[in-house]
Image (cartoon, rainbow, N blue to C red):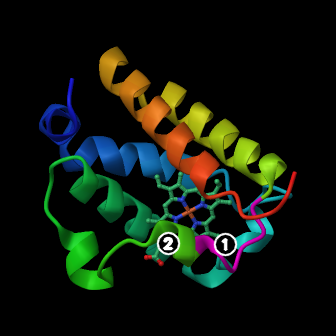
Amino acid sequence: MDDAQIYAAIGEEGFQRLVGLFYRQVPTDDILGPMYPKDDLAAAEQRLRDFLVGRFGGPQRYIEQRGHPRLRMRHAPFPIDREARDRWMELMGHALDEAQLPPDVTEFLREFLAGVATMMMNRAE
Ligand code: HEM
């Protein structure tokens, strides 16, 4: 399984389902809820979805609209310590479990997302 095969396997719909299931948990989360824009969560959902779609072989909407991802820089305003990183992965883990994507896709995405989440940490342990 390589990156471009993921979009071919799950399409727009698979990413939409996954990211929707993730964001559904955000507003009531005590760590992540306060970090995300309350009135504009749908737009945030769209940004993550478009990023993943483009990253895994689909249309390049994210780059067209937002430019180079520069994810570490874009996360710099948010205090992401180990606890916040682990919580993000916990919610994403629920989403991956619930989305019922093909098992090889689920495991590929879980590893990718965990690796990027670790890179987003910007506060000392
Ligand atoms: C480690 C824990 C993480 C935390 C606490 C976190 C938090 C946030 C927050 C608060 C935003 C702003 C919401 C918005 O208005 O778009 C954001 C944006 C974003 N995040 Fe994360 N994030 C994490 C990990 C990740 C990971 C692992 C990815 C990708 C694999 C990711 C991709 C993005 C993208 C694409 C955006 C939109 C950036 C933009 O265009 O402005 N994040 N994140």
Is residue 76 magenta-colored? yes
Q: Image quadrant of ligand 1?
A: bottom right
Quarter holding the N terminus?
top left
Q: Which residue is mark 1?
A: 36
Indicate left or right for 99 with 12 as reference: right
Q: Is residue 55 above or below residue 60?
A: above
Q: What range of the chain is rendered magenta?
A: 75-80
Identify the secondary structure beneath mark 1: loop
- Inspect the image, locate mark 2, and give the three-letter code of the amino acid beneath it: Ala
Name the one closer to the observer, 42 or 58.
58
Q: Quadrant of residue 50?
A: bottom left
Indicate left or right for 56 with 91 as reference: left
Residue placed furthest toward the top? 103
Indicate left or right for 9 with 115 as reference: left
Name the one closer to the observer, 79 or 123.
123
Q: Are marks 2 and 1 in contact (CB under 8 Å)?
A: yes
User: In the rendered structure, which disc, 2 or 1, sits on the residue that comes first in sequence?
Assistant: 1
Q: Is residue 71 above or below residue 22?
A: below
Q: Quadrant of residue 46?
A: bottom left
Q: Position of residue 107 (x, y in %)?
A: 42, 22
* Residue 10 image label: none
Q: Position of residue 66 (x, y in %)?
A: 33, 82
Q: Which residue is mark 2?
A: 44
Alpha carbon distance from label 2 to label 1: 8 Å
